[in-house]
Image: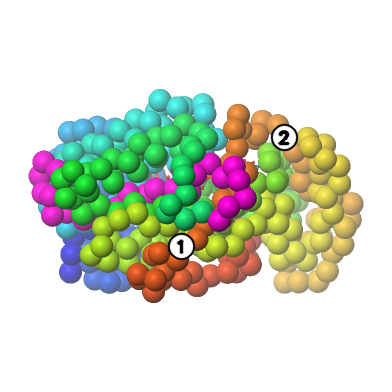
Amino acid sequence: MSKYLIFGATGQDGSYLAELLLSHRHEVFCIKRRSSSINTMRLDGIINHPSIKILHGDVTDTASVMQLISQIKPDFVLNLAAQSHVGVSFNEPEYTAQVDAIGTLRILESIRLFNRNIVFYQASTSELFGGLDDKILDENSSFNPRSPYAAAKLYAYQLTKMYREAYSLQTFNGILFNHESPRRGENFVTRKITMGLSNILKGKFKSIKLGNLDALRDWGHAKDYCEAMYQMVNLNKPGDYIVATGECYSVRDFLNTAFQEVGIKLKFVGSGVLEQAIVMEKSKTDYNTENVAINQVVVEIDPIFFRPLDVPKLQGNSQKFRELSGWSPKITFRELVAEMVKYDVAF
Ligand code: NAP
Ligand code: F7E
């Protein structure tokens, strides 16, 4: 049994990771930041487990980070804390840097000062690459951050690598490609689509308003990726590792798959900001589509969701990590979409 400390435990990944660690009989210290309303909903299923402790902390506060690491004396520290929304980072660049970049520095410095034997995991990201060319990305691909989020994460990535080289800390950069689940934040595109579809089926809204439908992403399931994080920090081989499915789909593909799941076939008409998706056909499934009409416009473009710069395509090659760990994703793209649709429609 080891002691794991998770910064960002109340988020999508933090909650799956905490569940996984408890299932392996570890002691889990979950750090939550102070909020005016409840922010531990994703931890509801495990909150009363005897091996979990939920403590206040904030990575923007040096004393808070130092105190947690010195008092808990963890074996592993996983830094999942972030302002994780790429679009929001254009509006809150300095705050994003404080949390995502300097927050990581605070944790690494605390580890360097208090206990250099701690194993450290940094939630690095495929956003580092920028995705401007058609290449499948691996650990040797060059970085080209295209948002304040990616720039902050690049600083954190480099620090994580540098503390390994300079101070022999056992640090890991998990360069994870997009991963989703029913616990995904509501303003990321996949969850926005499955929640929007649910509202359309219930007759609450007529359409979903989105930005760039051409973006291509390598979408995996957060559960699979938390398993990868756990295997990575137990590799005894500190380093930088890509975690990806290797498959790539567009936002339009995600829309088609989600609507197909409930028996609705879409047709995309128009282009640019005038593009729309309309209902072409309905077929029988377990889902009730009586509130949806043939020819109804169910997807519209709203330029407010365009970013000053976007990342056109991210597709990863995780061979290095797969060969070392034996890890591979278990949940397919179609299964991921089906699970998210089912969850949101039942909600
Ligand atoms: P998420 O759902 O947005 O979770 C982020 C977590 O960070 C939440 O627990 C949040 O707390 C916490 N947090 C934010 N500011 C904090 C602060 N100042 N101090 C302490 N905690 C703070 O993100 P996720 O999808 O689980 O992703 C986990 C990590 O992986 C993030 O670092 C993200 O950037 C990175 N990443 C994600 C993906 C992906 O596709 N999901 C891919 C690559 C990398 P609240 O719950 O109170 O907001
Ligand atoms: O956008 C486009 C958008 O916000 C995906 C984070 O977890 O993964 C995530 O970042 C694509 C982009 O994720 C809307 O322009 C179209 O091209 O779901 P997203 P992301 O930006 O890829 C990486 C790996 C991380 O590290 C991040 O933390 O979809 N898009 N229309 C839209 N995106 C949003 N959010 N909302 C729309 O309406």
Q: Position of residue 304 (x, y in %)?
A: 66, 30
| Position of residue 318 measured from the top left corner of the image (x, y, whole percent) | 46, 62
Which stretch did the figure color magenta?
112-136
Q: Residue at 31% across / 71% down in the picture?
A: 23
Split into 4 quadrants, where in the image is the N terminus? bottom left
The answer to whether 94 is drawn above or below residue 30 in the figure is above
**What label does residue 318 carry, if any?**
1
Query: Looking at the rendering, which quadrant does residue 119 occupy?
Result: bottom left
Q: Residues under labels 1 and 2: Cα distance?
A: 35 Å
Tell me: 54 left or right of 279.
Answer: left
Secondary structure of the residue carrying tag 1 is: loop
Q: Is mark 2 within 8 Å of ligand 2?
A: yes
The residue mark sitting in front, 1 or 2, is 1
Camera-side residue of 152 and 299: 152
Query: Percent x, y for residue 309?
Result: 59, 32
* Pointer 1 or 2: first along the chain: 2
Q: Nearer the viewer, residue 130 or 2?
A: 130
